[in-house]
Image: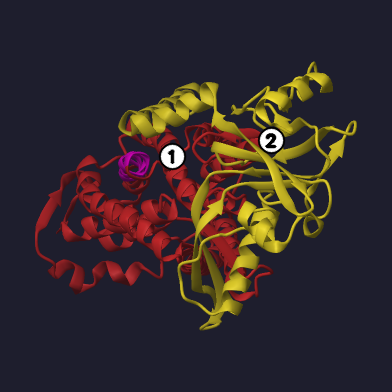
Amino acid sequence: MLMYLPIAEMAVSPGTILMLGVLVGCLSGIFGVGGGFLATPFLMFMGVPPAIAVGTQANQLVSTSISGVLGYWRQGQVDVKLAGVMLCGSLVGTLIGTILFRLLQYIGQINLVIPILYVALLGVMGGLMLFEGIRTALRRGIASDSILRPWHDRGFFKSLPYKISFPRSQLHISALLPVGIGFLGGLLVAVMGIGGGFLMVPLMIYVLGMPTLLVAGTSLLQILVTTIIATMLHATANNTVDIVLAALLIAGGIIGVEIGVRIGRRLNAVYARIVLALLLLAVAFQIGLGLFIEPSELYETSLR
Amino acid sequence: MIRFFLIVCLLLAPSVVMAQTAVTGRSLSVNLAADHVDISLGFNGADLSLFGVKNKPGDMAIIVRGPEQTVVVRRKNKALGIWMNTRSVEFLNVPVYYDLAVSVPENELAPMDILKKNRIGLDALDLGVEKNENEETLDNFREALIRNQQEGGHFPLTPKPVTFISDDFFRADFHVPADVPTGTYLIETILFQNGKVIDRRETRLRVAQVGFSARLYRFAYDSSFVYGLAAVFMAMLSGAGAHLLFRRHAL
């Protein structure tokens, strides 16, 4: 059975999309990541136009991040002021990212730049997480030692101007740091269709020096607002949000998260991180392969 | 599956057709019984059957042509060890869908210049190139474009047959794939005699989304801001709902 997507103007198998949603939800449940890094490339692989994959994925991330934010909110683990400052950056990032996406599409290099970004980002983050995970596993659970750790005390970060206090996180840091991290996050949402939690979380811990307890909730609140704005931008400027596709992904995701949470409870956190790292590397490898192997069809066509 | 027939009234007995011909000079009749393809959420592609009557001997060609669009064809080359798009050619008048049914092979229908004039066959399509590239490059890009369209089922691999039910009553079957582009399609039925066009009929086929799917599409384009809000609202509601439903006990 096939289902016609009114905006993508193509037919897909709803079962496959639901399963993808379940899988992505599972990842969120186990590892606390958005799973966009898996969903967006997979949608493109299925033949969904890249612009619609990214726009719809932003919409789906709204659903994932709000249920996460609510959970952390109840436990008081959200620094609203910090999230607000990060948002200033991510708004600009989203806007620039949306324009960048259009530009790349116009010059015909979107199918080159997106895979390269994925390979670079997933490869580096996966590599770092794997390295750190193995080190922690060997030392039996001392997670505080990190490769990014030394950054925290760098004088450079402390010398930046526009200092603001964040009472909830007990920080007095330059506003440029959270704005910069937010900017990166916004770019990722708009160009790659991923929430970027797995990049922002370590940056918030080690560059901002935030208490670990507040990081997840705060980054999720920031992702929530960013993805809402990205969805609005994609829907109004590009008409690339397919609500039917999003609904299928969300439905699968809700089921998947429940499965994932149950698996996650039985999983040792350190090993879970190693598995996630391997997953990131596998996706990076798979996408990277496409760049280096001679394609069977050298020509591609696109509508102008 | 949506099946619809473009039927020349079966009731039209040949004698009646003759009588009509006497008045109008028509030697060819094609009529559309269903002049639209409806795309709804369950759309799975459609089969198109066309019936017609001719009352003069000759060979037939039936062309189905979708609206034209500009298509960019890009070629990957190895640069810095990576396969990336390096050259591109723009084709200005590419029909989004093209199919063809013939009663005899194309080259027996008419000479090439007449085929070209009537856009019969993939070789005869004028895709409208603007760039001043050399012939060989253009041919390669053109072939690639046709190959890609064929793979997507939007161009035919081989022409379909025109089948004759009786001497003058014929039918042709086409299939449009599930991702068929929307728009107004032109169906041309041409009658050839000794390589010359002696009659032609033109019919239109409307391919459009209908029902819920069409409403969503119009909603997304006509009031995109509200559509965006609806998408966000839907996501927030389902996310929050899932949280309340499942997480309440956990926390």
In reply to whether residue A8 is colored magenta, the answer given is: no
Image quadrant in which the N terminus of chain B is located = top right
Q: Is B172 positioned to the left or the right of A292 in the image?
A: right
In reply to whether residue A234 is colored magenta, the answer given is: yes
Q: How is the image coloured?
A: by chain
Magenta segment main secondary structure: helix
- Judge whether residue B148 can be spotted in this image: yes
- Chain letter for the yellow part: B
The quarter of the picture where residue B7 lies is: top right
Report the magenta residues as a range. Answer: A220-236
Query: Label 1: which residue?
Result: A241
Q: Residue furthest bottom?
A: B80
A285 is higher (above) or lower (below) than A141: below
Q: Amino acid at mark 1?
A: Val
The quarter of the picture where residue B34 lies is: top right
Q: Is A82 positioned to the left or the right of A214 in the image?
A: left
The quarter of the picture where residue A24 lies is: top right
Name the chain letter of the residue that bears numbered label 1.
Answer: A
Mark 1 surroundings within 10 Å by alpha-carbon count, few (fewer than 14), some (14 through 19), many (20 or more): many
In terms of depth relative to the viewer, which is nearer, A274 or B215?
A: B215
Q: Residue at x 46, y 27 (%)?
A: B216
B151 is higher (above) or lower (below) than A115: above
A114 is higher (above) or lower (below) than A62: below
Q: Residue furthest front?
A: B22
Nearer the camera: disc 2 or disc 1: 2
- Chain letter for the red part: A
Q: Amino acid at mark 2?
A: Gly
